[in-house]
Amino acid sequence: EAQVTQNPRYLITVTGKKLTVTCSQNMNHEYMSWYRQDPGLGLRQIYYSMNVEVTDKGDVPEGYKVSRKEKRNFPLILESPSPNQTSLYFCASSPGNSPLHFGNGTRLTVT
Amino acid sequence: SQKIEQNSEALNIQEGKTATLTCNYTNYSPAYLQWYRQDPGRGPVFLLLIRENEKEKRKERLKVTFDTTLKQSLFHITASQPADSATYLCALPPLSGSARQLTFGSGTQLTVLP
């Protein structure tokens, strides 16, 4: 089944403790992206990647890092999480200029 | 920068009626517009894409219009059912013309009452 898989689905952590949210897609898509979704603010793009080793900032990249060493994986790294990064995170992928396929989200709480 | 507005955060309609959701945008002329559906706790799912040279597009009970003069897209669900209850998001490409960075509206939560 074609899908974008994020892990974990839920994560509670403390301020400053580094964490990684994984994202993997099995559709051989070139493009991958991370969004965060907050009430009233909608989906906002954090980082995106056009292909392996090619990444760029979205609208809200501060406090986040990404890497794209393999085509299928695009992990999101929070080196020193803070409470304002509490949010619902979505990974998405697409082949070329096509609509996005989203994962089922990771709900992160930073206390 | 471009701005996207979706009408009212919530819309309640009676089963069988037509739901109409609005997406307005300012400050540019996008080459296309997309609509997604999002259920609670799930990621958005793509529904329809309409290009600037298309006035209307249909898929089963869904219809999307794109008025580049009014800078508005309307999303219609005919013969609505309770299973259509969800949040609907519109999305547009960025000013730069890149197809990679979609900007999403904040969504309209539709509830279809039985």
Image: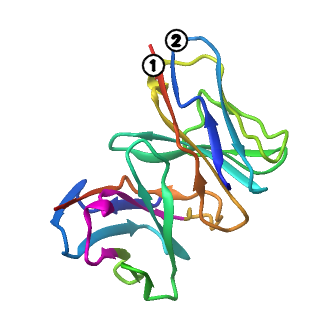
Where is residue B84? Give x, y as percent.
32, 63
- Residue B13 in view (yes/no): yes
Under mark 1, the amino acid is: Pro
Specify the subunit that label 2 lies on.
Answer: A
Q: Height in image: A19 above or below B56?
A: above
Instruction: Please give the range of residues in magenta.
Output: B75-92
Where does residue A27 sit, x and y in percent of width and height?
Answer: 74, 56
| Among the 4 quarters of the image, the one containing residue A39 | top left
Give the residue displayed 35% in from the left and 67% down from the top.
Answer: B23
**B64 or B98, which lies in front?**
B64
**Looking at the rendered structure, which numbered label has been put on residue B92?**
none
Q: Residue A54, how many percent across, how many down?
A: 80, 47
Which residue occupies 55% across, 39% down? A60
Q: Do labels 2 and 1 share a chain?
A: yes
User: Left or right: A72 with respect to B46?
Assistant: right
Q: Examine the rendered structure and indicate whether residue A54 appears above or below residue B34.
A: above
Question: Distance of mark 2 from mark 1, alpha carbons?
Answer: 7 Å
Find disc 2 in the rendering and name its residue.
A15
Per the image, the residue denoted by label 1 is: A83
Q: Can residue B30 be seen in this view?
A: no
Q: Element at badge 1?
A: helix
- Whether the magenta-drawn stretch holds residue B34 is answered as no
Whether the residues at callouts 2 and 1 have beta carbons within 8 Å, the answer is yes
